[in-house]
Amino acid sequence: MIPAPFDYEVADSVGHALSLLGDREDAKLLAGGHSLLPLLRLRFTRPALLVDIGRLEELSYVREKGDSIAIGALTRHHDVHRAPLLQEHNPLVSYAAGRIGDPQVRHRGTIGGSVAHGDPASDLPAVLLALDAEIDIAGTSGVRTVPAAEFFQGVFTTAAGPNELVTEIRVPKLTGDHGWSYLKFRRRAQDWATVGVALVAKRSNGGVESAAIGLVNMGATPLRARAAEKALASGGDPGAVAAEGTDPPSDTQASADYRRHLARVLVRRAAQEALS
């Protein structure tokens, strides 16, 4: 289908983008476009104005910031995957970015766009949730920081308001005693995950001191598998309780029951991989 008519402006700075958003009641940000353009073509969204922020080089970077790695919101998935700092200090993010879609998607899609879109079937939101990442949101009153646990609020709903934009994501540096895994099941290579699991475990004295598990497509938002985390840390079977507290959808890809089964299988496999 053909999108409904809209105006188009190119932002030359973060401040300019915020000004353009504030000038129109129904404006949308355009970065890589892989989430927005399909919605436009199907007329599921009909913005009066598109604000193109894809050329803001100030938001494309990967750099150290204390004990964290800061990633600019407009950093392409391909560049997140290839970034030496992430490969060294947080390979979970690097690896997961390399599993997104196909090469065309990874060369155009951005980490900020993926996060701000708030799709529970996306890879990186669950990874950021498991890592207790921090997300910076810029607005006319300044920049505020929101933890990943509070950022994702519902299907396609996040803490970023209509006149705000995500500017930076920060993830912790993982030390040598951390094991990690990212596994997902999908029917085709470029499909959204039917179910995905991001797992980080801190090892100590041959056991697990603590664990964090993020689930993809098991509810209206990315979810933490709290019961599975406790089971893994106590030496139990995390897979047996992996689906507790989840509310997976039933659709053409899988039923809710099948998703619960996949979560149990993938959490077990991710735990084995992270601890191996």
Image (spheres, rainbow, N blue to C red):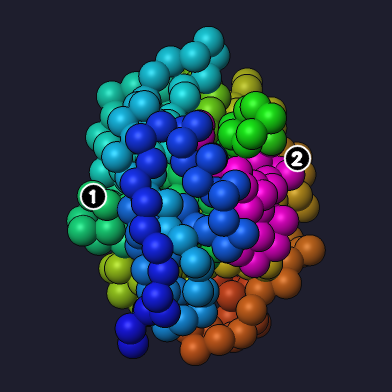
Name the amino acid, label 2: Ser
Q: Nearer the viewer, mark 2 or mark 1?
A: 1
Name the amino acid, label 1: His
Q: Position of residue 147 (x, y in %)?
A: 68, 36
Q: Position of residue 112 (x, y in %)?
A: 46, 44
Find the residue positioned furthest to the front.
23
Q: Is residue 231 visible?
A: no
Q: Position of residue 26 (x, y in %)?
A: 58, 63
Report helix, strand or loop for mark 1: helix
Q: Name the residue rendered at 54%, 40% in the picture.
A: 18
Decide: is 109 above or below 80.
below
Q: Quadrant of the C terminus?
A: top left
Decide: is 176 above or below 276.
above
Q: Nearer the viewer, residue 47 or 119?
A: 47
Which residue is label 1 attached to?
Answer: 107
Give left or right: position of 131 versus 124: right
Decide: is 275 above or below 226.
above
Per the rendered image, the range of residues in magenta is 147-168
Report helix, strand or loop for mark 2: loop
Q: Name the residue rendered at 38%, 41% in the picture.
A: 11
**Label 2 to label 1, Cα distance in Å?**
41 Å
Q: Name the residue rendered at 63%, 22% in the picture.
A: 204
- On whether residue 164 falls in the magenta region, the answer is yes
| Mark 2 or mark 1, earlier in chain | 1
Which residue is label 2 attached to?
Answer: 234
Q: Nearer the viewer, residue 170 or 216?
A: 170
